[in-house]
């Protein structure tokens, strides 16, 4: 028996493709049935959850609607109904929630319509239109909403051109945000000002100025910033000036050293100005006596002096007080403070100079002239005397009252606020209030003070300060003293006026009587 082996042909490409599709469809059909069932269960669970959430939110919204009367309460209630609408949309149209849907539409319509009326009453017609449009999206056949919209549209047409546009109104939130940001930057700038961080404060305030140029707070703190910058520059300038003064002191003449100066003349032992004990005691009391309260409401000077006299007596620990006097007498020989007119005044006798080799005496005679009339070239006549003023009736006003002031300070203030110029002088026995010269052309009264110094030390000190060598001649004659209207001529060989000699131990000063009083 013969057997023949037959070869098996491979499966074609088309057959393999068909077989793969058959196997895939069979497997997919089994899986899809199971997946659809799972998806259906999940969707049912989500809908049930949404229904429960809808009912809860709807109860909350109905409760809030019952108590809502203010605009902010109406807005909160509308937001609750909006959340209920979201849950209702999740459930879908076939969820069996028709009653809940009717409640949502009724509640939303009532709340939104109430808000629309509030906006319409305040002439915010576009906002009212937005509220009623929201109602019509839920219930397009709502009669109340349709009627309100028709009325609101007529109002919009009537007020067209008399209200801001919607675009302008839409910018309100942006403008408010800019103002809030500017206010925040102003507060930042204020903080930096308090910390004296002027550069950081300036940057913040400039940013705030760009956002809100009309802000009063911005300009107020910018003004404070400029004041602080000005004060800083003033301090810098003061420090720079002080540094320059230090440099001047450091470069001063190094050869001048007070410790290297010769010993002072033992004969001259003091350089104190002589002041009597009486004046010293009065000046001390003026500084020690303190008044609790001082107030004068147009009182005459006589009553003011009587008051100060009583207070000084009561508050003086020694119980003596201070003598206070008022004098209507002028301080000079002329009327109303004018000196007697003498066009030709004789000069005084010259001073006498002393030296090691001998001294000469010079005599000066001055022919002085008073004030000269520029038109005639002749001596000008003195001004006519003014009307005499009774110091006792001079009015003094100090209001509001001063607290805890010294008696000397009160006297200074009285002379400043009196309605007629006055001054006071401290004598050995009393404080005297007199007229104060204010006529043009008059000069302050000059007084003489004598200081005892060592001539060697004095001259060497002048040489060190001025940088010039002061030579004291052996045969120096004294310069002449001046009379009224002009000074006398110097003697031969001229020297230093006042009679200063080498190692003479003399005194230097202006000729004349010692000062009898201190004037203020």
Image (tube, rainbow, N blue to C red):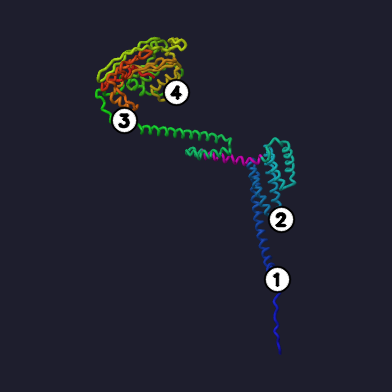
Around disc 3, counting alpha carbons within 10 Å, would you say few (fewer than 14), some (14 to 19), or many (20 or more)? some
Pointer 4 with pointer 2, Cβ within 8 A? no
**Which residue has dot 3 on it?**
256
If you read the primary sequence from the N terminus, does the residue marked by circle 1 or circle 3 appear first?
1
Q: Is residue 241 left or right of residue 211?
A: left
Pointer 1 with pointer 3, Cβ within 8 A? no
Q: Which residues are drawn in magenta?
A: 168-189
Q: CA distance from mark 2 to mark 1?
A: 44 Å
Q: Nearer the viewer, mark 4 or mark 2?
A: 4
**Which residue has dot 4 on it?**
401
Q: CA distance from mark 1 to mark 3?
A: 123 Å
Q: Is residue 131 left or right of residue 462?
A: right
Q: Position of residue 490 (x, y in %)?
A: 33, 16
As drawn, the residue found furthest toward the bottom would be: 1
Q: Position of residue 149 (x, y in %)?
A: 73, 41
Q: CA distance from mark 4 to mark 2?
A: 91 Å
**Which residue has dot 1 on it?**
17
If you read the primary sequence from the N terminus, does the residue marked by circle 2 or circle 1 appear first?
1
Q: Quadrant of the N terminus?
A: bottom right
Q: CA distance from mark 4 to mark 1?
A: 118 Å
Q: Quadrant of the C terminus?
A: top left
**Which residue has dot 2 on it?**
94
Q: Let me know if residue 486 appears in the view.
A: yes
Q: Is residue 350 above or below residue 252?
A: above
Around disc 2, counting alpha carbons within 10 Å, would you say few (fewer than 14), some (14 to 19), or many (20 or more)? few
């Amino acid at each position: 028996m013969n057997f023949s082996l037959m070869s098996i042909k491979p499966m074609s490409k088309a057959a393999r493709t068909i077989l793969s599709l058959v196997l895939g469809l069979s497997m997919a059909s089994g899986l899809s049935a199971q997946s659809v069932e799972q998806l259906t269960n999940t969707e049912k669970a989500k809908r049930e959850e949404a229904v429960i959430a809808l009912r809860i939110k709807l109860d909350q919204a109905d409760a809030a609607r019952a108590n809502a009367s203010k605009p902010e309460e109406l807005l909160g209630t509308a937001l609750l109904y909006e959340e209920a609408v979201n849950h209702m949309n999740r459930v879908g149209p076939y969820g069996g929630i028709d009653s809940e849907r009717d409640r949502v539409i009724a509640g939303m319509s009532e709340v939104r319509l109430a808000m629309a009326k509030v906006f319409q009453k305040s002439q915010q017609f576009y906002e009212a239109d937005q509220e009623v449009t929201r109602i019509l999206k839920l219930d397009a056949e709502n009669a109340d909403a349709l009627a309100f919209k028709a009325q609101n549209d007529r109002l919009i047409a009537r007020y067209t051109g008399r209200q801001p546009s919607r675009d302008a109104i839409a910018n309100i939130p942006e403008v408010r945000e800019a103002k809030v940001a500017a206010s925040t930057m102003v507060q930042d700038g204020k903080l930096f000002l308090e910390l004296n961080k002027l550069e950081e404060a300036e940057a913040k305030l400039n940013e705030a100025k760009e956002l809100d140029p009309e802000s009063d707070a911005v300009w107020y703190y910018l003004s404070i910033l400029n004041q602080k910058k000005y004060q800083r520059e003033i301090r810098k300038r003061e420090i720079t000036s002080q540094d320059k003064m230090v440099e001047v002191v450091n470069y001063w003449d190094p050869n001048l050293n007070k410790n290297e100066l010769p010993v002072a003349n033992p004969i001259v032992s003091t350089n104190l100005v002589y002041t009597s004990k009486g004046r010293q005691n009065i000046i001390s009391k003026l500084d020690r006596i303190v008044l609790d309260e001082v107030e004068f409401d147009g009182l005459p000077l006589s009553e003011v002096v009587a008051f100060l006299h009583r207070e000084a007596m009561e508050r003086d620990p020694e119980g003596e007080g201070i003598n206070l006097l008022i004098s209507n007498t002028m301080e000079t020989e002329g009327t109303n403070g004018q000196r007697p007119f003498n066009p030709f005044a004789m000069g005084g006798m010259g001073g006498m100079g002393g030296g090691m080799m001998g001294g000469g005496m010079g005599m000066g005679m001055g022919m002085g002239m008073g004030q000269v009339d520029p038109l005639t070239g002749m001596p000008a006549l003195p001004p006519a005397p003014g009307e005499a003023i009774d110091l006792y009736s001079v009015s003094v006003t100090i209001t509001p009252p001063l607290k805890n002031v010294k008696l000397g300070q009160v006297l200074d203030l009285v002379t400043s606020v009196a309605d007629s110029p006055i001054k006071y002088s401290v004598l050995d026995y009393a404080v005297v209030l007199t007229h104060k010269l204010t006529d043009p052309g008059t000069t302050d009264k000059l007084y003489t003070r004598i200081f005892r110094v060592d001539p060697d030390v004095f001259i060497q000190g002048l040489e060190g300060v001025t940088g010039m060598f002061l030579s004291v001649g052996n045969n120096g004659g004294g310069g002449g003293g001046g009379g009224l209207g002009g000074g006398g001529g110097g003697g031969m060989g001229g020297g230093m006026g006042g009679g200063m000699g080498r190692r003479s131990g003399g005194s230097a000063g202006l000729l004349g009587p010692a000062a009898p009083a201190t004037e203020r």
